[in-house]
Amino acid sequence: MYENLNDNCTDAGIKAEGLGKRFGDFTALEDLDLVVPKGSVLGLLGHNGAGKTTTIRILTTLSVPSTGSATVAGYDVVKQGGEVRKRIGVAGQSATVDGLLTGRANLEMVGRLYGMSKREAAERADELLTRLGLTDAADKLVKEYSGGMRRRADLAATLVSTPPVLFLDEPTTGLDPASRNDLWDVLREQVSEGVTLLLTTQYLEEADRLADEIVVLDHGKVAAAGSPDQLKQRVGGDRIEITLADPADAGPAAEALAGFAENEVHSDPAASLVTAPVRAGTRLVEVVRSLDAAGIDVTDVHRRDATLDDVFLSITSAPKVEVHS
Amino acid sequence: MSETLILARRNLEHVRQIPEKLIDVTLQPLMFVLLFAFVFGGVIAVPNGDYKEYLIGGILVQTLAFGLMGPGVAIATDLGEGMIDRLRSLPIRRSSYLTGHILAEFAATILAIVVLSGAGLLVGWGIESSVPEAIGAYALLGLFAFAMIWLGTLIGTVARSTDVVTGIAFMTVFPLTFVSNAFVPTDSLPDGLRQVAEWNPISCVVAAVRELFGNPTAVPHDAAWPLQHPVVASIGWCVLILVVVVPMTVRAFNRRTTD
């Protein structure tokens, strides 16, 4: 069981070509190409139903693709599922630890299923409980864990066999910012040890912080792909969002904001909202002054991070240029 | 095989955490024993025998029939959560989840049979046959339990929630065990109902168990064929259920977990 699983594969990352999945008439995923080199991180970014989970299920051999092919750690996910399963760790979106077992018992069971002896499994469980800060809760039932602890237990179970390729489906959804940061740290540590990671997320920020490459999925299709920098360049940085007292001011307001924007300004008169991706270093007070000078009455002005919606907005409004190399 | 044992242990560990899970195979049948032995038993006449000797075979089979609920709820729960995905992404044989599940449920069934046999002995039931026949009775109970566990697993795999499983179990098992010879001899039933009871598979398993234990069977001499040849008919029923249900379960399980 304990042969070095990294050695026998010259190409240890993830590759997919023309991957697709249909459920009856519904196309969940269409023509997905991916290359994730060994030791790098791919972020799959998209809303619910974009095809993220479908992709993970296919790559982790839980689901059979309708079209295309994929290899993980050098093995075909359809024809060599057993070999793939020896080399991957998977944390699904719903809890994949047993609520009626203790955290420790969960990890020991997974270890035993990987063929470890009782002692090896117990030692590995201890090690992971310590590493993920679950020592105090080790002997409590998982159903009594908080959301953040459960996620960490999930991740611990995923790491039991020290797999060279990790798949995490929305690992931080529902976590508070502190737990999220902790989890990111653990993931970075894994990657620095040479692990290949594919994670899905709905948060642009998360993909930006962790991923070397980002693929944006929309309704089962690739909407954009590239490095976080390429994507951000296209999307722009922070947003300034103003709410107008009078929707009729949308035009002049957009003109006033254009001076600060590094990309196209979007106005949504129906919601009395104008949004601009602003250049770095823009001061809110300057924005307010120029709006005031133009005689525009606003009820709210605020600055926020770019979101997945901004990504889609910039993709759909900008001319179709493929960012990806 | 060791994977199966590790996974069976997981289910047994659930019982250790939540002992109430065993109520349906321990306290509930005991309640039926007391209820029928001492409350209704006085007014039910069994030709050539004592009602308590008659009763235990019926309650054993009824308990095992209700035993389809446990495996159904267990698998529906696992399918509703992500646990099965975790297990299926591990390098283990994909059949080991199902075999571990069946094994653990079978262990619970053995507990039920032991508890009920003990309770029976206390209220005046006994094994009046030879050792091989008694072994045959327990083997038949095991076979029937096995069929019911698979049936429950099928229901749990197809159902979308645990409530559906308990609903289906009550709606089918209650009428099947009460319109049978489990608690009353069939010749006490009105025409129509009597024929249903005599062709009911539960009845022939109950009659077979009584016959093998040497207990009074109270089978009327004009009873339907399965009741006249209960052992053969019971084995036939169990094998038929298994032949139909096992492949259906495996297919349904694979379908629900591969997409």
Image: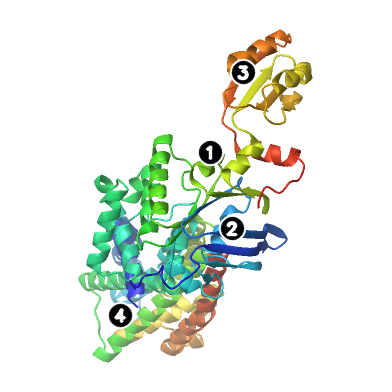
Separation of disc 4 and disc 1 at Cα?
A: 79 Å
Q: Is disc 4 placed on a helix, strand or loop? A: loop
| Disc 4 versus disc 1: nearer the observer | 1
Q: Which residue is mark 1?
A: A205
Residue B218 against residue A110 in the figure, above or below: below
Picture residue at 27% right of the left edge, 49% below the top:
A130
Separation of disc 4 and disc 2 at Cα?
A: 64 Å
Q: Which residue is mark 2?
A: A54
Picture residue at 49% right of the left edge, 41% below the top:
A209
Q: Is disc 2 placed on a helix, strand or loop? A: helix
Label number found at residue B240: none
Residue B178 seen by the camera: no
Q: Would residue A227 appear left or right of A94 to someone viewing this image?
A: right
Q: Report whether mark 4 lies on the same chain as mark 3.
A: no
Q: Chain of mark 3?
A: A
Neighbour tally class for label 1: few under 14, some 14-19, many 20 plus, Cα within 10 Å? some
Residue A295 against residue B235 in the figure, above or below: above
Q: Which residue is mark 3?
A: A301
As shown in the figure, which amino acid type bears the numbered disc 1?
A: Glu
| Disc 4 versus disc 3: nearer the observer | 3
| Disc 1 versus disc 2: nearer the observer | 1
